[in-house]
Image (cartoon, helix red, strand yellow):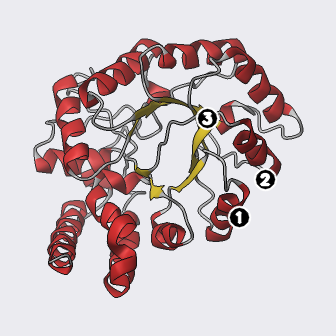
């Protein structure tokens, strides 16, 4: 398996119209924004995409649309298997593969849907591997909904040794775990990509070849600079990493509607409609617009500073 998926990989939003349909023009604008801002790949049909609230037809349509509009400029990976039944999951994964995406991502909690532990995960994984195309690049995603199911070291080593997996979206949120996983997968095609902003820079320095946390929906270019230039400008990188971690603390304030509000302000798309968030985020989180103003100002400031550092 030679396909390489790493770098800065946004977890994609799904824009909706005010009537609740997928806004494909807004999605196309968003794809262009991700690519223009330094994204190395795109993760379509994930939790940030509100996959648990999309029909199978919508998930397939999203994956196909993103793959077509990316047009080979960056790889596209997609998940979207949300069922508990193995046969249904296989159907979801095969449908994703048929869209032509560059990799299909398995959600770890779906392989152990009742959090039973024991042999359940490995039994489900092996069952799926026997039925998925052998040449299909695969990923793993420790999606936190409906619960976070972290891989054990033995499970991760099995996946790395199989040669079929190219990425793990690591949601351990623990630097020592990330370091251990990097060591366990050395020499395999499996890249460990941390998703936690608080440890993003430290994980990169430890060998994690990228980042795919939710604030790639705000400033993926700043994470890209950390990855590609941070070692050469360690003082500025340390300072930037603090800003990025503090900015990401806004995530509990109605994400993904929060990120949609950010893109509404940018003009990427018109509506902040969300199927996952059913309340008015501006009403619930006081001074939210003012907070976004500060995040935008900090983003602009650090864009200027990293640009100056390269001159």
Q: Residue 1 appears in which quarter of the rendering?
A: top right
Question: Within 10 angstroms of label 2, few (less than 14), some, or many (20 or more) residues?
Answer: some
Q: Say which element carries label 3.
A: strand
How far separated are the C-alphas under marks 2 and 1? 9 Å
Marks 3, 1: nearer the viewer: 1
Residue, disc 1: 180
Q: Which residue is mark 3?
A: 107
Looking at marks 3 and 2 on the same chain, the residue that comes earlier in the sequence is marked by 3
For image coordinates 73% across by 36% down, the residue present is 162
Q: Secondary structure at mark 2?
A: helix
- Whether tag 2 and tag 1 are in contact, CB under 8 A, the answer is yes
Q: Earlier in the sequence, mark 3 or mark 1?
A: 3
The residue sitting at 28% across, 22% down in the picture is: 68
Number of residues whose C-alpha sits closer than 10 Å to that of mark 3, classed few (under 14), some (14–19) or many (20 or more): many
Image mark for residue 153: 2
Q: Nearer the viewer, mark 3 or mark 2?
A: 2
Q: Residue at x 26, y 34 (%)?
A: 273
Q: Quadrant of the C terminus?
A: bottom left
Please state the horizontal and vertical placement of residue 210, each as a whole percent of the image: 45, 57
């Amino acid at each position: 398996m030679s396909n390489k998926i790493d770098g800065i990989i946004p977890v994609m939003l799904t824009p909706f119209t005010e009537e609740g349909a997928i806004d494909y023009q807004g999605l196309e604008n968003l794809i262009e924004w991700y690519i223009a801002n330094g994204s190395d790949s795109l993760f379509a049909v994930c939790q940030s995409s509100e996959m648990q609230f999309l029909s199978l037809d919508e998930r397939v349509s999203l994956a196909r649309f993103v793959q077509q509009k990316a047009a080979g400029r960056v790889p596209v990976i997609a998940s979207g298997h949300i069922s508990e039944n193995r046969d249904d999951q296989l159907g979801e994964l095969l449908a994703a593969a048929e869209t032509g995406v560059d990799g299909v991502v398995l959600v770890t909690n779906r392989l152990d849907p009742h959090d039973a532990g024991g042999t359940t995960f490995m039994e489900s994984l092996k069952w799926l591997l026997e039925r998925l195309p052998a040449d299909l690049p695969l990923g793993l995603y420790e999606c936190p909904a409906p619960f976070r199911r972290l891989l054990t070291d033995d499970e991760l080593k099995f996946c790395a040794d199989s040669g079929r997996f190219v990425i793990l979206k690591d949601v351990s949120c623990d630097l020592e775990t990330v370091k251990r996983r990097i060591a366990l997968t050395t020499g395999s095609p499996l890249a460990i990509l941390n998703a936690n902003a608080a440890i993003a820079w430290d994980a990169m320095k430890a060998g994690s070849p990228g980042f795919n946390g939710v604030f790639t929906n705000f400033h993926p270019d700043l994470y890209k600079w950390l990855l590609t230039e941070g070692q050469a400008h360690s003082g500025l990188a340390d300072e930037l990493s603090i800003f990025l971690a503090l900015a990401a603390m806004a995530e509990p304030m109605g994400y993904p509607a929060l990120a949609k509000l950010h893109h509404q302000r940018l003009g990427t798309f018109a509506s902040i409609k969300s199927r996952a968030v059913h309340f008015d985020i501006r009403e619930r989180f006081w001074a939210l617009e003012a907070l976004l103003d500060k995040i935008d100002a900090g983003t602009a400031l650090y864009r200027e500073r990293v640009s100056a550092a390269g001159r």
